[in-house]
Image (cartoon, grey):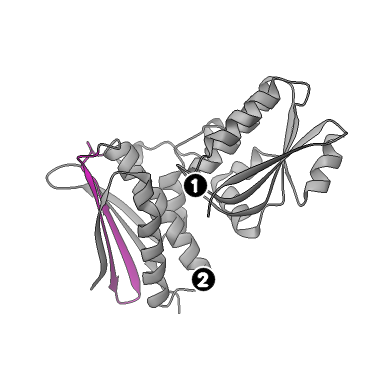
Amino acid sequence: MPFEVERSALDSGVTVLALSGTMTMGNQLQELEWAVEELAKTPQNRVVIDMAGITYLDSSALGVLIGCHSAVQKTGGRLRIAGISSRVGAILKMTGVDTVLSLDPTRDHSVTALK
Amino acid sequence: MIVFSSTLDSVVESVDGAEESVRRCANDAGFGESDQFFIGLAVREILINAMKHGNRFDPGKKVGFNVSVDGRDLVMDVTDQGSGFKLEAVPDPTRPENLERKSGRGIDMARKIMDEVSVTANSPCGSHVRMVKRLKS
């Protein structure tokens, strides 16, 4: 399943990147990190990555999420991850990445946390 | 008994088919859907490691992938033609100082998913990773 990113800028100044498909090496993952790196340099550096549409990810995708987290942290922005499935959550927990990222059950929870 | 055998080019695109095949083998061996999912993930990680860190995506080098059934064990063998590595030399990615590293998680994920993971030297060169997932009664 192709990996896709849909971007929305909310009135609150928060940017939501809604992901769908599978996040695996070679599946244009890097575009997500580049998008977040660009946002991190702007006033729109409060970012939600909504992963409700992600059914599968591998360790390359975890690396990209860590990269997004680091890029936003460097510029004083904030990043929250929303809507992970139980399987994706299990992968994050298995690797300890769940302790690095800020996770919320839904996009609305993340947006509220960034207001 | 070998139930699947393939020689893969060292390109990421070849991993999807291999993962699909091992999931099918796991299904045929009686593993449930959740186990099939995680077995597929572990195999993906080890195949990518073999292509990336072993063969360095050299188009002249291949990755061998066999799946066999031994009693209640699903046994998966991955070989590469790289310079080899030692399992104990791989840093633990879950240690606090490594948690924010962008790579280095694949083998650890496989070890957590599988019942056994071993690494030996492959002949004449490279590494041989054997993974075993045991069917619980």
Q: Residue at x 26, y 39 (%)?
A: B55
Residues at circles 2 and 1 in contact by the CB criterion of under 8 Å: no
Residue B71 visible in the picture = yes
Question: Viewer-proximal residue, A16 or A78?
Answer: A16
Question: How many numbered markers are drawn?
Answer: 2
Q: Position of residue B57 (x, y in %)?
A: 30, 37
Question: Viewer-proximal residue, A57 or B78?
Answer: A57
Q: Is residue B64 magenta?
A: yes
Q: Which residue is mark 2?
A: B33
Question: Viewer-proximal residue, B82 or B9?
Answer: B9
Q: Residue at x 65, y 24 (%)?
A: A38
What is the secondary structure assignment of the residue under circle 2? helix
Mark 2 vs mark 1: in front: 1
Determine crowd level at label 2: few under 14, some 14-19, many 20+ residues with C-alpha closer than 10 A. Answer: few
Query: Does residue B7 appear to the left or right of A92 in the view shown?
Result: left
Q: Position of residue B16 (x, y in %)?
A: 40, 55
Decide: is A14 above or below B3.
Answer: above
Q: Which residue is mark 1?
A: A24
What is the secondary structure assignment of the residue under circle 1? loop
Which portion, as a residue range, is magenta?
Answer: B59-84
